[in-house]
Image (cartoon, coloured by chain):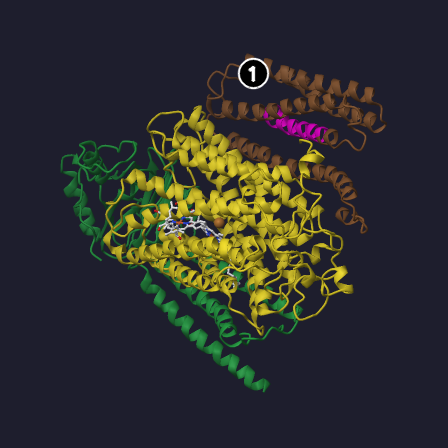
Amino acid sequence: MTEISLEALSPKREQPVPGEPENWRRFFSFSTDHKVIGIQYIVVAFVFFLIGGFLAMIIRGELITPEADLVDRTVYNALFTMHGTIMLFMWTFPVLNGLANYLVPLQIGARDMAFPRLNAVAFWMVPVFGVILMASFLVPGGPSQSGWWAYPPVSLQNPTGNLINGQFLWILAVALSGISSIMGAVNIVTTIIRMRAPGMTFFKMPVFCWAVMAAQTIQLFGLPALTAGAVMLLFDLSVGTSFFDPATGGDPVLYQHFFWFYSHPAVYVIILPVFGVFSELFPVYARKPLFGYKFVAVSSFVITGLSAIVWVHHMFASGTPGWMRMLFMASTMLISVPTGVKIFAWVATIWGGKIKLSTPMLFALGGLVNFLFAGITGIMLAAVPFDIHVNNTYFVVGHFHYVIYGAAVMGIYAAIYHWFPKMTGRMYYEGLGKLHFVLTFVGVNLNFLPMHPAGLMGMPRRVASYDPEFAYWNVLASLGGFLLGVSTLPFLLNMISSWILGEKAPANPWRAIGLEWLVSSPPPHENFAVIPTVVSEPYGYGKNEPLIASQMASTELTSELS
Amino acid sequence: MNLRLILKLAAIAGVMTAISLWVGQLAYTWMPVPASEEALLVDHLFSFLTTLGTFIFLGVAGTLLYSVLFQRAAKYDEGDGPPIEGNLTLEIVWTAIPLVLVIWIAGYSYRIYDEMNILGPMEHMHGGAAIAAPLTLAQATDAPEAPEAPEIIEVHARQWVWEFYYPVANVTSTELHLPNHRRAKLTLTSEDVLHGFFVPAFRVKQDVIPGRSIDFEFTPIREGTYRLRDSQYSGTYFAAMQANVVVESPDDYQQWLTDVAALSPQPGLNPSYDEYQVKVENRDNRPGWKTVEPAPYPLVNYSGAPVLPER
Amino acid sequence: MSSVNLDQSLNSAATVHAADHHEEGEHRLFGFIVFLLSESVIFLSFFVGYIVYKTSATDWLPAGVEGLEVREPFINTIVLVSSSFVIYIAERYLHKENLWGFRAFWLLTMAMGSFFLYGQAVEWMGLDFGFTDGLFGGTFYLLTGFHGLHVLTGVLLQGIMLGRSFIPGNYDDGEVGVAATSLFWHFVDVIWIILFILIYVWQ
Ligand code: HEA
Ligand code: HEA
Ligand code: CUA
Ligand SMILES: [Cu+2]
């Protein structure tokens, strides 16, 4: 532990000028302001999203015809390995950490995160391991070609024989990503547990914070297991130990357990904050309180708990005995219970409301429907006899892109639009936003729905070439993929132009309830001149009750501040 | 009024049930032609899951759609909706319903699994164990015949070619031949990395793990040629690691074994090695990285034809 | 809820910061505990790996290796475990604001930790199998090495805290660094006890 000195923490603390014109250069500096770090995370992650998406475009280009004709097979294998790795470790985790960084202190009424400097260090590791991962395109053997699971023995094969090879850099990058994520998790959990404003008990805390805390708890218990596996893999690869190499008595299946013990829960690290976003947005745009707030809040932690005991469903066709298959089938299916609680609560929130279909709401609704579909295919996958048939086929690829793109990425878009005025002090363009939504929603379904029939017919994943019987579905998928590529253009255009030219945003453009909407847009340096005292539950739509103590005296505070 | 609501809901539920059952029947057609007893069971399960899944999807998405279409705020309406915060009965009901559904789905899946009697890679069938195992469909149908000693076929996987060895006839091939309506008993081994034994038409799959020998069983029920695909990613030429599976009548099968036993060993099919040669001889100049070298052509009695099975 | 005790009437920036700073310390200790819990999962994973290997491997010990000598490591264990008590005494002295008592026992802890490291180094030198000698060699060096790294970190942290005790007034308003270091030391100790049982006792 390093002591964080007082001076380092508060260079500008003396002048919290609301909405002061901000200097763009601070986004390129080692800032310790959680709001700056949050935006840094989001922007850097989005750059990697474009890179990972670009690789996906080449993948879909290759797959539009049955033959392996666009790129060499080694290149194809490197492409999907890097695509999966970038998308998970350098897009979803960082962007969600960015949202959490930006929103959590504001929503709980704190001036910053518990450890601002640790926060900055954790962020700055992202570009570092990003560059390391990218650098693997330049080493002699090329990047890792063993898929994002890096299953041994393939991941140990190292045909060039170099010590510094793509797989080595891959492990290094993933390990650094893990360290950065653990730093982030310690910080966020500490912040939420210890820095809430007076009066904000756990059951007055917004669901987004609940969900983030549940997600970060997973990082804390899951990542160390992955790290342990990665360390052993690294020694096998570089030093010649025999942990996972069957040629010298090792056990490759043990690696799979290490890997999935983390990487299954990791999918809930991704989806839980998105659930949080849904829970924040539906009440605002349906003008109703969140239905069953406490149930929704607690169900996140039920998911966290269950997530630790289902990992073997990724290994049903691997070296897994029958009793384990049945046990993990049951535990996996149980996840639908707490998830169902959330889904039904959102539907009940929307039901009978006064719905406004602005861009964030559209993305949230689209994400919800996609998630529903993906959750149902997930339950199918959990049924062992069926999973045996579709395991490692495009059915699985379809399932997880529906969750990850259809629900998570769309939920992230929803969050970015919803809090864009808060973050930048500008309004985005509604028309471009709606165009973005239509392209994304059509693209997702055109891209990922055809993957299901292809998988049912028996098309394996990770193939550069396939039998012509699958061609039809792949052409559709590729067209959808390209459409998704195009869909990023209106988004980029919207974000950049409205950040520069957009209309100035008031403190609370959506008439939303929450501490973050009580401060100016963008919020001043220390967020709150006076730490508010929270007096009621969140989501008091239609109840006309004050959220914080000072509003009891003057409900006009909101407008004064803006 | 209340009665009308109930009738309306019942009507909606009826329509949804009808649609779900119909989609559940459609689900059979999304699968390849079932060519094993296991396939029939899996298809039933899939149809069941699809029926239930469709119902849930329609129920939830339909409700959402209704809200979105008919419960929109008027253009200048800045007001709030009714401040309903929850309803304990509802909460409990919709926690209980998924729980019941899950128990149902898991129970049904378990039954199917039990009937399929898939051998887990940990359960080696040796001698007496086979008798102790629950009666399988295959054993049930074949019961009248004398329980012959199981004819085991060895499946060898290596980067990136399949090779099959029939110990009774001392025959090797790069095309898998199986007698129809007989329980196929395979031993899966790998010489290098993980591979996966996957025949979509049979709905069976098992990772092949180096350093282990895995017993695997299923029962083909339909004559024809099918595709065996590698299902566990195994490196550069993974996609090319496929082979044909021929299911023929037991007589034809025996005939094939004796015919082939007389043939002298010749290079078997090995598409990945063919492709590698193209690369080595620089007839393909797309940039790529160094790869693990494919295993050379295995010497086999019978190679099979390099044609895709008809669909 | 500790975050609630922020005084309502805080309005001058200076008092805000003083309160923040005091809270900071408690946050840090809390954060550190969270980190330790997470860290323990790495060890847990290694332990599980070890148990799986040991119970399933066909040839566990490398050819020519009989097993491990227990006597020296046992002495080492005694020293490391007792150092947990010593560091506790040091902490008590600090509480009573007896800086020299603190330093003396703190130094003794460091000495005991270093003795442990030295003992382990000697043991490693004397072994006739290496890191790459099968699963036994691999897991043995992985576990003891990873733990040794933690002991080394602990001793270094203790060194830093000792140095800081000479900065006047440094430990006036709390001793989070000392508390954290001592906590870390107990953690390293507990891990060692499990490790010792797994590797040396269960042969
Ligand atoms: C954000 C990501 C995310 C999320 C949230 C999920 C959610 C779920 N996933 Fe998915 N999954 C992935 C990402 C995700 N998954 C990825 C990336 C892979 C592949 C990795 C790889 O191989 O590379 C994968 C693979 C994967 C497999 C392995 C398949 C295989 O390789 O053979 C399985 C198997 O059980 C599975 C199941 C589930 C289940 C049961 C859920 C559940 O959480 C879903 C729960 C939701 C619902 C069920 C819907 C709502 C509920 C109701 C409306 C209540 C009523 C419903 C019922 C009673 C059914 N997933
Ligand atoms: C967050 C996670 C995430 C996201 C968002 C995506 C997004 C996409 N993914 Fe994928 N994907 C994974 C995670 C993700 N994926 C994982 C984990 C795997 C498994 C890997 C493995 O098997 O190991 C996988 C595998 C995978 C496969 C299977 C490969 C195989 O098995 O052989 C395919 C095939 O179609 C695919 C396609 C796509 C497509 C078309 C998109 C599209 O949605 C992308 C849309 C495109 C963009 C958004 C970018 C647009 C950019 C431009 C047009 C150019 C700009 C360029 C620059 C600035 C450089 N992905
Ligand atoms: Cu061959 Cu996988
Ligand atoms: Cu999973």
Q: Which quadrant of the view contains residue C179?
A: top right
What amino acid type should be assigned to the residue bearing mark 1?
Answer: Trp
Residue occupying image coordinates x 49% and y 38% = A127
Q: Which chain: brown?
A: C
Q: Is residue A336 above or below residue C149?
A: below
Q: Is residue A116 left or right of residue B173?
A: right
Residue B302 position in % (x across, y down): 17, 40
* Residue name at image x 45 percent, y 74 percent: B16
Query: Does the magenta segment cover residue C187?
Result: yes
Foreground residue among A63 and C79: A63
Our reading of the magenta stretch's main secondary structure is helix
> What is chain A's hue in the picture?
yellow
Q: Position of residue B260 (x, y in %)?
A: 16, 41
Q: Is residue A309 visible?
A: no
The chain assigned the colour green in the figure is B
Residue under label 1 = C124
Is A501 placed above or below A183 here? below
Could you tell me residue A502's position as x and y percent?
A: 51, 58
For image coordinates 43% across by 30% down, the residue present is: A168
Looking at the rendering, the stretch of residues picked out in magenta corresponds to C181-203
- Residue A143 position, x and y percent, is 37, 35
Residue A184 inside the magenta-drawn segment: no
Asked whether B96 or A179 is in front, the reply is A179
Q: In the picture provided, is C156 more to the left or to the right than A281? A: right
| Image position of B150 (left or right of A115) | left
Q: Quadrant of residue C192?
A: top right
Q: In the orientation shown, which residue stands out farthest toward the bottom?
A: B1
Q: Residues within 10 Å of mark 1 (few under 14, many from 20)?
A: some
Instruction: Say what secondary structure mark 1 lies in.
Output: helix
**Residue A288 visible, this angle:** yes
